[in-house]
């Protein structure tokens, strides 16, 4: 759409159709080395128009400046540019993602805290229309410059003698294959599928992308997420401040606790954010009729999948959890369950502003403390090609996502900082759910992901440091570009979606300028 806005013609090849297709989803099947660590790729990818926006939790937040810097205490960090190169594109990304104005700080509220070791000024925003095919589908289909072709899976990029992509081989569900001549190719297939396509190119021409022992497929990152502690706030003002709220700028927002850059340097931390959450909905001991009603809805697959992505549903409603205690909670306070559910569904699906989740405040002001932390770069955390192929002839992936004790120790040190800061500022107390010394192991034991696919096609300043350059163009194939979180050299603490869209808009502007320059008459 950004390219078409510059008057350029675009052929958009979409592997799926407008709706989910179970047979096509099988094309995303991978060999998972450790299923305790990585989700089934058939539920972390969406092979349909709109891609994984169909699964997205709607969180929008920019990267932090420290994320793009080379940090000596974290090996493998450093982008080929600073945040000032991406920041101008966040406003356009907010428009495209319908998350209101690009305001991600609330200095007025945070200004009362003189202790700046923990930053409470930063906000995350939430999309009002997270499924992109619903938000932009009509405009996409009606644009005469966009040729949208559904059920067309690119299975091969054929290079000419000059090393440029000459044409794509495209396969349809019935097995029919077509040759599509191209001038420039942008791979926007999601992190793992983009990497798989490029690994398949490398298998045919082993010298590409640094060769088999190079960086392609390495440094696979996600985020370290979970809860290992609870917080008891000292006043109702605090838990109210960390609830979802409409800030008057076009979407719901939420505040977070984030260690300051100075503390990250001093304590050798990875970047991490914290926020209070309701008790685990699957644990009926919370006694809440509303939370039990939510669990029962999520535990019933057909209903739960209508409410959220399957990977998120399984995280909150594990298979085999007894339903009886939850049903008892609902029956004990049926009016609360019915009224709360109706209110949430209205705010979620009928209101002008879509509430992204639920945060039920309680008289004890006690909540779980959720964390979303940077996953440290590790060359041995990687994806490679498996010996098996899908039914269209593409090799399947072998996924070996790895979390380390170094990840866990950094997150634990951030908890210690937060605990000290809460107490020093009279905001509350943090209590671990296990002995403090056992907390790093608990963080490592619960580390699991698969929906944020980061780092496997790294951006760098040259061949030694990356697969693509600062303009997202392949160093080896000069008309091949990548629009994906796969190019991020580090993951940061933020959900990657807003930055993916910002970099895509930046790439479109770069391509438009380059193409128009070539069309201009020479002097």
Image: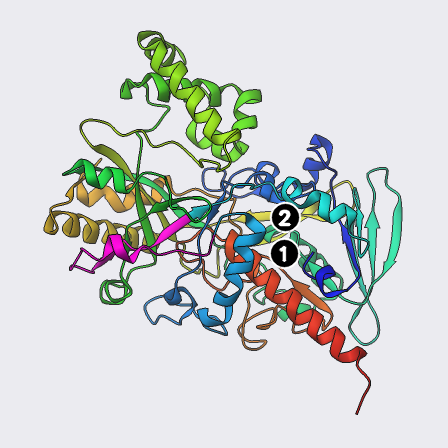
Query: Could you say which quadrant of the image residue 206 lies in?
Result: bottom right
Of 309 and 509, nearer the camera is 509
Q: Main secondary structure of the magenta part?
A: loop
Q: Which residues are magenta?
A: 101-124
Residues at discs 2 and 1 in contact (Cβ within 8 Å) = yes
Residue for badge 2: 397
> In this rendering, is residue 71 above or below 347?
below
- Identify the secondary structure beneath mark 2: strand
Which of the labelled discs sits on residue 195, or is there none? 1
User: In the figure, is residue 246 to the left or right of 170?
Assistant: left
Which quarter of the rendering shows the N terminus? bottom right
Whether residue 394 appears in magenta in the rendering, the answer is no
Whether residue 110 appears in magenta in the rendering, the answer is yes
Q: Position of residue 398 (x, y in %)?
A: 60, 48
Which of the labelled discs sits on residue 259, or is there none? none
Instruction: Judge whether residue 211 can be spotted in this image.
Output: no
The chosen color scheme is rainbow
What's the residue at 59%, 76% (across, down)?
A: 463
Q: Position of residue 39 (x, y in %)?
A: 52, 39
What's the residue at 28%, 19% (across, down)?
A: 285
């Amino acid at each position: 759409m950004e390219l078409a806005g510059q008057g350029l013609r675009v052929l958009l090849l979409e592997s799926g159709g407008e709706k989910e297709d179970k047979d096509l989803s099988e094309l995303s099947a991978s060999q998972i080395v450790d299923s305790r660590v990585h989700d089934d790729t058939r539920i972390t990818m969406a092979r349909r128009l709109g891609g994984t926006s169909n699964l997205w939790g709607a969180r929008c937040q920019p990267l932090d400046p420290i994320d793009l810097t080379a940090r000596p205490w974290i090996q493998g960090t450093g982008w080929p540019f600073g945040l000032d190169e991406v920041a101008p594109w966040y406003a356009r990304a907010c428009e495209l993602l319908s998350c209101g104005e690009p305001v991600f700080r609330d200095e007025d509220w945070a200004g009362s805290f003189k202790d700046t070791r923990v930053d409470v000024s930063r906000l995350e925003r939430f999309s009002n229309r997270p499924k992109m095919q619903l938000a932009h589908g009509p405009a996409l289909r009606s644009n005469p410059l966009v040729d949208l072709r559904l059920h067309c899976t690119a299975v091969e990029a054929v290079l000419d003698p000059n090393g440029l992509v000459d044409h794509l081989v495209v396969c349809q569900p019935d097995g029919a294959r077509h040759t599509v001549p191209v001038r420039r190719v942008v791979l926007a297939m999601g992190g793992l599928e983009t990497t798989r396509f490029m690994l398949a190119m490398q298998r045919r021409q082993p010298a590409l992308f640094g060769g088999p022992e190079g960086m392609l497929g390495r440094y696979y990152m996600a985020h370290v997420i979970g809860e290992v502690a609870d917080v008891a706030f000292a006043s109702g003002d605090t838990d109210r401040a960390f609830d979802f709220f409409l800030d008057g700028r076009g979407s719901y927002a939420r505040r977070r606790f984030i260690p300051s850059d100075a503390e990250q340097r001093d304590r050798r931390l990875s970047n991490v954010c914290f926020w209070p959450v309701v008790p685990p909905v699957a644990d009926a001991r919370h006694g809440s009729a509303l939370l039990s009603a939510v669990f029962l809805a999520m535990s019933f697959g057909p209903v739960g999948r209508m409410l959220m992505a399957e990977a998120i549903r399984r995280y909150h409603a594990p298979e085999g959890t007894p339903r009886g205690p939850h049903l008892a909670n609902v029956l004990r306070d049926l009016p609360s369950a019915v009224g709360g559910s109706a209110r949430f569904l209205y705010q979620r699906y009928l209101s002008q502003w879509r509430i992204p989740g639920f945060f039920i405040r309680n008289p004890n002001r006690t909540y779980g403390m959720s964390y979303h932390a940077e996953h440290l770069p590790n060359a041995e955390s990687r994806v490679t090609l498996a010996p098996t192929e899908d039914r269209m002839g593409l090799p399947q992936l072998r996924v070996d996502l790895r979390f380390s004790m170094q990840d866990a120790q950094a997150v634990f040190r951030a908890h210690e900082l937060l605990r000290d800061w809460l107490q020093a500022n009279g905001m509350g107390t943090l209590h671990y759910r296990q002995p403090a010394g056992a907390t790093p192991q608990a963080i490592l034991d619960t580390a699991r992901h698969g929906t944020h696919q980061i780092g496997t096609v790294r951006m760098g300043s040259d061949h030694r440091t990356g697969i693509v350059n600062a303009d997202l163009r392949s160093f080896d194939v000069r008309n091949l570009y990548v629009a994906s979180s796969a190019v991020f050299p580090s993951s940061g603490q933020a959900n990657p979606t807003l930055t993916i869209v910002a970099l895509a808009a930046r790439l479109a502007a770069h391509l438009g300028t380059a193409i128009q320059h070539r069309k201009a008459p020479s002097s």
